[in-house]
Image: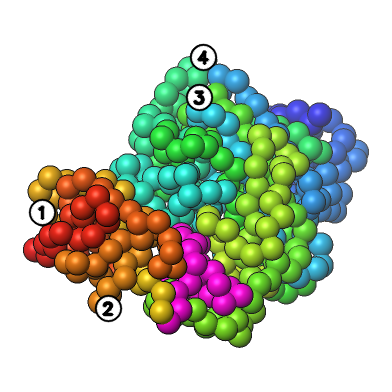
Amino acid sequence: MASIVSLCFDGSSFSLASSLYTDNSLSTLAPDGYYSQGQIVRRQLNGVLLNAQPCSACLVECGTGVSETIGNQNGIFNADIDLGSSTGAVVLYFFMGSSVPDGVIANYNLINYNRLTAKDNHNGVILKNGADVTVDYAGIANQGTNIPTYVGNQNTALVGSYTNAPVGSCSQGDRPQNYNLVSGSYDAQGTFESITVVNNQVGFSDDASSISSPVFAMVVPKTSITPTNINLKIFAPMCGTAFGWEIACPVALPSFTASAEQSTLACAAATTTYYFLRNATGTTPPFTISTNTVPEIGNFVFSNSNGATYLNDTNTIKYYIIANTTAIGVRNGVVVSSASCTSAGTNTSFFGTSGTSSLADGMCNVNVANILYHDGTGTLPQVGDTIYSGSSPSSSTVTWTNYKGFNPADVGGGSTSSGTVNASGVIQLIALCP
């Protein structure tokens, strides 16, 4: 394994220097041998540095994975990966352990990527930012920045500054040390970097999620033969971390056909080809990649095979009908719901809150996420309409206690009305939200 040494050189940079020295007065030449800095390696022979060469040992081949445990330390872990000359979607998966979240950012062709989802996101797994606000995907408020998105299991101690000079064993708030991946192992560089973590950088899995620390997935589009290298940094500012990641070589994403984008769950023929990113499970690479042939809740979805353009990358839910039977709801590029589409003569779909309130306006500021159906003629149920669990009139009826909030779509703005039902699922009272 390479060792870290402090040396001086006589040029404006390592790649332009003539010789290396062991002292800042440049009087004692460093021993002959090979030296590297960043992605440059040079051999000093008879006290003279030979031509700069790319550091082949510093590059990781795509199609591999890395696991790292650093005990009671913190760090910023840098890796440069060779993607080859193929084009397509570069898929990365990350597992950040069970208690210490870590940051992720990839840079390809001078563009930063820090947008991640997880298996069962919106289907049992809840992603939250540092202010405890539910988000559609990790990094939703962090796009267009050059800073990482922190994922893993929820930890309230993460947000804050890490600017203290390390003294002895690691303490919360210490500056993390820089590491470079060389020949499959991260080497400590002996340098430290101050960082700050803010709420918008966070998208970890809520402690209440059924999978408190899932595998997170990211896609980076490689649309041209060059450049061939991608840089990946893992930020672990808290003391003690264990993480694993793997990266696939560029390939076309799996495809599916569905209807054009629409605002309702009405059944429609599949006319367009789209693409999606499969999620994964596991704790160490290689992770177990899902084998679903159509998008699941929590998958990123795209209009192209390299993952360059997300479907409906807006805050308003839109629907795509698969096989004239299934309506997937897409918001901010991720599938957030899946339900049977509705056709003429069937019940009308709407969304309701998971809980109820004894007050008529008690659900007005609560998100709706549960799909329900009614047999009325309006967009939302009215007094006398019956509530069902499915689109078919033969589906079972649904009942609840007190007022449940209603909205035509799964939105974050809260309910637009609320209503009560009797034991047969028939609406008894309707109240409009102010």
Q: Are marks 1 and 2 in contact (CB under 8 Å)?
A: no
Q: CA distance from mark 4 to mark 1?
A: 59 Å
* Disc 1 residue type (three-letter): Ala
| Callout 1 secondary element | loop
Check the image and report above or below for 419 versus 238.
below
Foreground disc of the pair 1, 3: 1
Q: Single out the mark in the foreground, 4 or 2.
A: 2
Judging depth in this view, the residue of 232 and 177 nearest the camera is 232
Quick one: label 1 or label 3, which is nearer the N terminus?
Answer: 3
Q: Earlier in the sequence, mark 4 or mark 2?
A: 4
Q: Is residue 51 visible?
A: yes
Q: Which residue is labeled 3 in the image?
A: 239
Amino acid type of the residue tagged 4 in the rendering: Gly
Q: Secondary structure at mark 2?
A: loop
Q: CA distance from mark 3 to mark 4?
A: 12 Å
Pointer 2 local density, CA inside 10 Å: few below 14, some 14–19, many at least 20:
few
User: Over which residues does the magenta segment extend?
Assistant: 317-344
- Disc 3 marks a residue whose amino acid type is Cys
